[in-house]
Amino acid sequence: MITHQVKRGFDLGVAGAPARQMVDAPEPVVVAVRPGDFPGIKARLLVQEGQTVRTGDPLFLDKLAPETKFCSPATGKVSSVVLGERRALLRVEITPGANDTFAPLPHFDLRNLSSLPRAELVGALLQSGLWPLIRQRPIGRIAGEDVEPVAIFVNGMDTEPLAADPAFAVHGRGDDLQAGIDVLRALTRGKVYLTARAGDAQREFASLHGAEVHAFDGPHPAGLVGTHIAAIRPLGLHECAWYLKAQECVAIGEWARTGRYPCKRVVAVAGSAAAERRYVRVRQGAPLSVLNAGKAPGQGVRVVNGTLLTGSVEPNPGFLGYYAATVTMIDEGADRRDLFGWALPQPRRLSFHRSVWPFARTASGLEVDARMHGGHRPIVNLGSWEAVTPLDILPTFLVRAIQANDLDEALKLGLLEVTEEDVALCTVVDPCKTDVGAIIRKGLDLYAKEI
Amino acid sequence: MKFLRNGVEKLRKLYHAPGSRFHKLWPAFDAFETFLFAPSHTAPKHGPHVRDYVDLKRAMNTVIIAMLPCLLWAIWNTGQQHFLAWQGLVDAGKATHDAYVAGWLQSLLGMDSVSPGAPEYVAFGLQRMLPLLIVSYGVGLGIEVVFSILRKEEVSEGYLVSGMLIALIVPASIPLWQLAFGVAFAVVLGKEVFGGTGMNVFNPAMLVRAFLFFAFAAQMSGDAVWVAGNNASHLIDGFSSPTPLAIVKSNEVLDATAELAKHHSTADLFFGNVSGSAGEMSKFCVLLGAAWLLLSGIGSWRTMLGGVLGLVGSAFLLQLFLPAGFGGPATLMPFEHLLVGGFLFGIVFMATDPVSSPETVTGQWIYGALIGFVTILVRTVNPAYPEGTMLSILLLNAFAPTIDHFVVAANIRRRKVRLERQ
């Protein structure tokens, strides 16, 4: 096992971590599957309102990659198909019946994986609606089925604030995890890497075989796949790597072992505005009230599908996002205004800057809200972006190149080594309140359009 | 606080919504409102949902706090030097206390020049420094607000630092109309035409000084301007005193250290009991400011350390290759270059300006060191100007993007090598 030490970074000492306690959520009365959870796809609906679907039946596909199916996580009636502007599909809602009937999915013997043609395995994953779990770098979207990756990264750690601990979420699912790794190994001639905290690598993931285990230590972004790829197997020009979280690998393993669509996820409920902070085993696409002790989150609460750094705001009442392993609830804070907020020392505020409080960087248990704490300004570089970025990139120059629409320069500066999650900390610590992630995504979109 | 908040909300109704009465002037109102209350708008739907408590207002305010020791010393020492000079003239029989003309604040307080003490020092210092600050901030911020309204964007805080810097790097005797001219020139042509805060090439405060230096040389250089007085040109009739660097400037001075010691003790140079531009005399106060900037992480320690090493190192190397008979500042002991002139102030407060200095950390080392090197060149090799800090910082401002370019090119090369290895 190789241990990598990440030096530059910043752990946000936010209050409201989930307790390490696992409960089963009650079965929801409605579940929703939304194309919006998969940026970059164009959905074509495959079902009608009133139709009965089984768990694992496809609900819609991606017009741009028609083999990619998105499946129902429950058995029941399609109670409503919600369309938005220009008849774009917003979500498919299903009212589950009493029991799950599983759609027959392509199945194969795990022992014969090595003799299975790769295309057949890819086809099975696509058909079974598990393909969207696999994402690719560069760009950070659902993997393209026609390219073979040079490596696959299974992420067994998460350093984002209040994030679910993958090692805890997959605890006791060793067989499924192993099966998942076996499936991934058949998808690439390169290596499968499993990354984890040093302790977990020796405990939870010690008995796994077929994956090269790397341990990462240090502050966030030590747990991001971008950091892992740069440290383990940097991507050359025209190369791509695939990545998924440990729990998503477990889902693939469950499917491979049972032939059933894996419809349950473990989600950590976190943040100081959450009613009960703990790990919940819940059906995919469940309403968020299921996670909040049956109650809809209160007024003035920001519910985030995902973590505070990379999630998106879920309207109230909302549903659990497809990729969300954490649901974070914090106060919105839109009614709070601090007198002379720019001048007074602030010992209990989230900050990377010692001008706010000399010991701010080591503070923990901080109450936070979603306020910006300042107006938007042109970029004035105080060196804080570089101080939280362990990758060998120059974030300021990369951002400037994208802002100038200079794609060539941006690529030279390492645009393809990052996605918005790798620069999320830059956005957080920036005194000028620049949305660095949005700019990076704009650059990646530009790149995707050009190729 | 409740009262204030209600007042602000009432004010907000007058300008905030499009179509409201003063909506066209919203940047000016907004600047006032956010000075009182931090804004309450929240993070967008995607991306980070929490933000650092820091904002540009706080970053700039941190620099202003760092300059406070220098400002306080400027007020004290402007008064102290004024009365020392006057007493010197009286002692020499060139003036009498009866002939002393008091300024506006001194008259208001009924002060004279016989046995001046702390109150008299401070009163005289304020009498000169307050108008400088008011003109510097008034003209500069006024222009910034007008440009913000024209551009329909929030007023940026960059000038809060520049305004204070400007008052500290000009002689306290500077005529106010000249200062106003200089500020207007630097803010409009040095900053706003480039797009305002964050876009300028040169440090605006240094640009003010350079403008005044070349446009009004009589009021910015020579031996007479460094002690303020109350005559029509804010000077003392018949008094002049050369700055420490001017004392040793002549090529005939073969041992500058000894020559300097005849006029000023090392302690006086360090603590600032000498005349000069308003705020840069006390190296002690500059170091206090530097400590605060480094503690708060706002100033780049690489630029500062690079500059000091560049200055002392260049002076040291120069001495090794000095031809026989070469006199002047080159014969100062290398560390003494830190004690004389405005280098320390410049490298701590002006070279570290994040906008006009390199943004790469390697670049900051090179930039700092080159400022030190060029300063020594101007001080020692050129026959005209005793001090080179201003010119070297402006020159390196111009080269900052070039320095960055080479550091960025190295990063690109490194990436290429890394990817080709795969």
Image: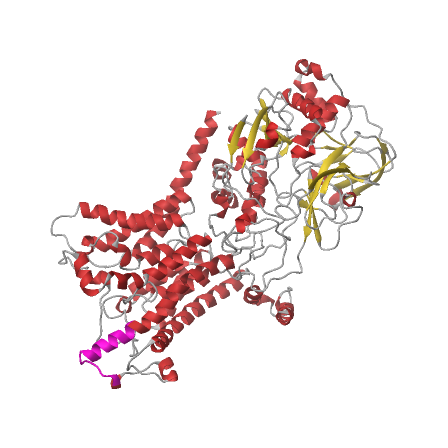
In which quarter of the view is residue A17 placed?
Answer: top right
Answer whether residue B286 is magenta in the image.
no
Point out the residue furthest to the bottom here.
B98
Where is residue A181? Give x, y as percent: 65, 23
What secondary structure prevails in the magenta region?
A: helix
Q: Which region shows up in magenta?
A: B81-97
Give the answer, above or below, for where B360 lies relative to B56: above
Res. A200 visible in picture: yes
Point out the residue furthest to the left here.
B325
For the point 38% across and 59% down, the residue is: B288
A142 or B312: nearer the viewer: B312
B259 or A407: nearer the viewer: B259
B382 or A99: nearer the viewer: A99
Give the answer, above or below, for where A341 lies relative to A248: below
Where is residue B277? Give x, y as percent: 31, 65
Classify the position of the C terminus of chain A by image quarter.
top right
- In the figure, is residue B180 to the left or right of B234? right
Classify the position of the N terminus of chain A by image quarter.
top right
Answer whether residue B91 is magenta in the image.
yes
Give the answer, above or below, for where B197 lies relative to A387: below
For the point 76% across and 29% down, the residue is: A262
